[in-house]
Image (tube, rainbow, N blue to C red):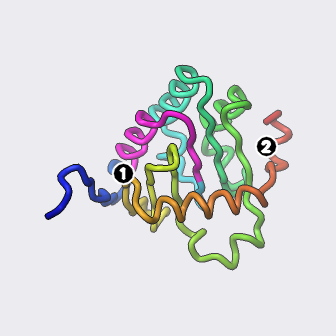
């Protein structure tokens, strides 16, 4: 018999599903968010409601920390002004880095985008271009794997030189 409290991962297919899942993840987040994406989709990553949710979470819970691993800023900076402004204002809570290019070339799993909140909630985009994937509000095996992968890449990542000029 299945556990009634067990929640199966929710499939995501497109912008609206992904946006709803991301907003739910942000609303439930209490302490940490680890966010990796090989592709920044401005429709999601610079969405006004998403950026407001991040700002509100940080303001209401000062100990919240967000770590984002993004492609080089030259690829997305002009398309994501809200994300840039937010990262300029919240430098202690919101840290942006760019993965080491050599690290990502030999790792097919880094072609996916993922977010891990509080080391237990997973939002995974198997297809980040089409925003297709899954949202797991309860821990699953892939949550731990994604978190370990994030930490490994984060430790080798650097601040993007294009963002340093902005004072980030």
Q: Secondary structure at mark 1?
A: loop
- The image's mark for residue 163 is 2
Name the quadrant containing residue 94: top right
Where residue 137 appears, x then y in whole percent? 36, 49
Residue name at image x 64 percent, y 47 percent = 68
- Residue nearest the viewer, comparing 52 with 82: 52
Q: Residue sitting at 77 percent across and 72 percent down?
A: 102
- Could you tell me residue 85's position as x and y percent? 67, 31
Looking at the image, residue 155 sits to the left or right of residue 68; the answer is: right
Residue 19: x %, y % from top left:
39, 45
Q: Is residue 58 left or right of residue 69?
A: left
Q: Residue at x 49, y 33 (%)?
A: 30
Q: In which image quadrant can residue 31 be found?
A: top right
Foreground residue, 36 or 143?
143
State the extent of the magenta-drawn residues as a range: 18-35
What is the magenta segment's predominant secondary structure? helix
In the image, residue 34 lies in the stretch drawn in magenta: yes
Mark 1 against mark 2, which lies toward the viewer?
Answer: 1
Which numbered tag is attached to residue 17?
A: none
Residue under circle 1?
Answer: 138
Q: Nearer the viewer, residue 83 or 145?
A: 145
Few, some or many residues within 10 Å of mark 1 (<14, 14–19, 20+): some
Q: Earlier in the sequence, mark 1 or mark 2?
A: 1
| Image quadrant where one finds the C terminus | top right
- Location of residue 104 in the rendering, given as x and y in whole percent from the top left corner: 69, 70
Quadrant occupied by the N terminus: bottom left
Q: Left of 125 or right of it: where is 34?
A: right
């Amino acid at each position: 018999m299945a556990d009634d409290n067990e929640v199966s991962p929710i499939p995501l297919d497109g912008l609206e599903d992904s946006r709803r899942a991301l907003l739910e993840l942000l609303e439930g987040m209490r302490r940490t968010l680890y966010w990796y994406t090989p592709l920044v989709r401005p429709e999601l990553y610079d969405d006004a409601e998403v950026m407001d949710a991040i700002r509100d979470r940080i303001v209401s819970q000062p100990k919240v920390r967000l770590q984002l691993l993004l492609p080089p800023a030259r690829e997305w900076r002009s398309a994501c002004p809200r994300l840039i402004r937010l990262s300029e204002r919240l430098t202690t809570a919101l840290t942006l880095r760019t993965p080491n290019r050599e690290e990502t070339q030999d790792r097919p799993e880094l072609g996916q985008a993922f977010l891990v909140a509080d080391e237990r909630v997973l939002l995974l985009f198997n297809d980040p271009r089409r925003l297709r994937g899954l949202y797991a509000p309860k821990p699953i095996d892939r949550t731990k794997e994604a978190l370990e992968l994030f930490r490994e890449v984060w430790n080798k990542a650097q601040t993007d030189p294009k963002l340093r000029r902005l004072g980030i």
